[in-house]
Image: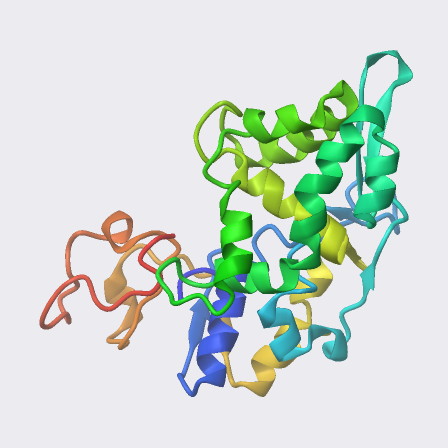
Amino acid sequence: MCTCRPSGLAAALTLAAAGVQVRVIEAADVLGGGARSSELTLPGLVHDECSGMHSMTPGSAFAQRFYLAGAGLTWRWAPVEFAHPLDGGRGAVAVRSVTDTAAGLGAGGRGWQHTFGPLAKRFGTISQEFLQPVLHLPRHPLHLALFGTYPGLPATLPARRFHTPEAQALFTGVAVHAFRPLDTLASSAIGVALTTAAHAFGRPVAEGGSAAIRDADAILVRAAEHDVRLQTGRRVTSLDQLGSPDVVIPRRSPRGSSSTPPASATGSWPPTCAPRRS
């Protein structure tokens, strides 16, 4: 595996637990990709350099399977999950309870309750479905169908259900994590998923910073237990550098990684690679 971001570490552990010998190579000197933390301003004050809050992680099948909390990872929750300020001292806040959040949104609360109430109650099974490969036989088709009414929509459409500027801003402030115009198709998917996750699981931070997720007290403990070999400070510029592995999982797609087979390649090219998308 030529990546050591959290997703790469999770994939490495999953493969190793299935009996695959895994070697992970990371160009940077430290592991974790965006899950890095350091003292950037004052001594003892730790800043997350990229990812900060982790709505999807505590309830994920990966975290439960490998019991990261038992490996020393501690989650911390704030009383308020997220907020959005507006001009004139106005604003809106989301708390863990959908009902309490809706109560603070005035006329926009009814739409918020109707949208996220049913989703939050079922998000444990809904997230199990969409965190799988897209092509699979759903175990909870009705729950997935309930969620599936929203992701394909432009984020501006669900926002209309909330009626007030405060409620609309609270949702669209999350939806912008799609990094695309909010009037485009499927731009609501990230907003609906992350908002529902905040109501279902909260938006916790890792004690000690996001780096704690990958540090020796969490994922690295599990990696050692499953004999995952980790190598940092090595940049792979050619697949010739990897020898002859049975499976290559690059950070990019096979097309983006290399269109030329290494000298040692035999048979079809590129080699078996999962996932096909980066």
Q: Is residue 210 visible?
A: no
**Residue positioned 45% across, 70% down in the render:** 24
Q: Residue furthest top?
A: 88
**Residue positioned 31% across, 54% down in the render:** 237
The quadrant holding residue 219 is bottom right
Q: Is residue 230 visible?
A: yes
Which of 74 and 133 lies nearest the eye of the viewer? 133
Query: Residue 47 location in percent, x, y?
Result: 77, 46
Query: Residue 17 location in percent, x, y?
Result: 49, 84
Q: Is residue 243 above or below residue 29?
A: below
Q: How is the image coloured?
A: rainbow
Q: Residue furthest left?
A: 267
Query: Residue 173 location in percent, x, y?
Result: 68, 30
Query: Residue 58 location in percent, x, y?
Result: 70, 64
**Residue positioned 52% across, 59% down in the render:** 142
The N terminus: image quadrant = bottom left
Q: Is residue 91 above or below residue 20?
A: above
**Residue positioned 75% across, 50% down in the render:** 199
276 displayed left or right of 15: left
Q: Is residue 116 above or below residue 180?
A: below
Q: Is residue 219 above or below residue 161?
A: below
The quadrant holding residue 159 is top right
265 displayed left or right of 199: left
The quadrant holding residue 99 is top right
Which of 270 and 77 lies nearest the eye of the viewer? 77
Give the mark count.
0
